[in-house]
Image: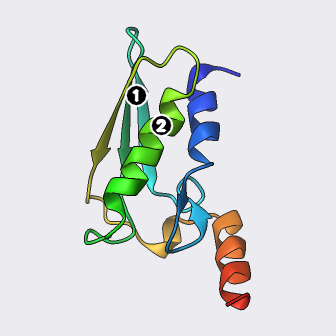
């Protein structure tokens, strides 16, 4: 598996605690840029700009990406354009949210 694929896989372990699905399936990660020196830049958003758990999610993203071999530094860039909408979610996220809400 190449480094970028490994980072995407690692990010699937980071869940939005309020929604109950991982940030990749939710469509929160807009892109990953790899530099030759091991720096990884991750462009992402949150479901709402006022997310009270933003710092926690960003920290988990940094830790997940840093766990990949060859990554020396991680920068998470929170962006608000394009705005996140539920249309960005994939079917995995929709199913996870359905199962999460039916168990409440």
Q: Quadrant of residue 101?
A: bottom right
Rendered position, 93 above or below 72? below
Residue 51: image location, x then y, percent: 32, 70
Gap in angstroms between the C-alphas marked 2 and 1: 16 Å
> Which of marks 1 and 2 precedes in the sequence?
1
Q: Name the residue under label 2.
A: 63
Q: In which quarter of the image is residue 31?
A: top left
Rendered position, 68 above or below 95? above
Q: Nearer the viewer, residue 101 or 5?
A: 101
Q: Nearer the viewer, residue 77 or 103?
A: 103
Left or right, 21 with respect to 37, comes to right
Residue 60: image location, x then y, percent: 46, 46
| Secondary structure of the residue carrying numbered label 2 | helix
| Secondary structure of the residue carrying numbered label 1 | strand
Identify which residue is drawn at 38% across, 66% down: 84
Identify which residue is drawn at 53% across, 56% down: 23
Q: Name the residue under label 1.
A: 33
């Amino acid at each position: 598996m190449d480094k970028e694929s490994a980072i995407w896989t690692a990010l699937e372990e980071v869940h939005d605690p309020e929604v109950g699905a991982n940030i990749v399936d939710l469509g929160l990660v807009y892109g990953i840029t790899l530099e030759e020196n091991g720096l990884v830049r991750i462009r992402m958003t949150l479901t709402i700009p006022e997310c009270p758990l933003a710092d926690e999610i960003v920290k988990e993203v940094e830790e997940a990406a840093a766990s990949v071999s060859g990554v020396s530094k991680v920068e998470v860039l929170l962006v608000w354009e394009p705005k996140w909408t539920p249309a960005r979610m994939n079917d995995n996220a929709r199913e996870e949210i359905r199962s999460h809400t039916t168990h409440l």
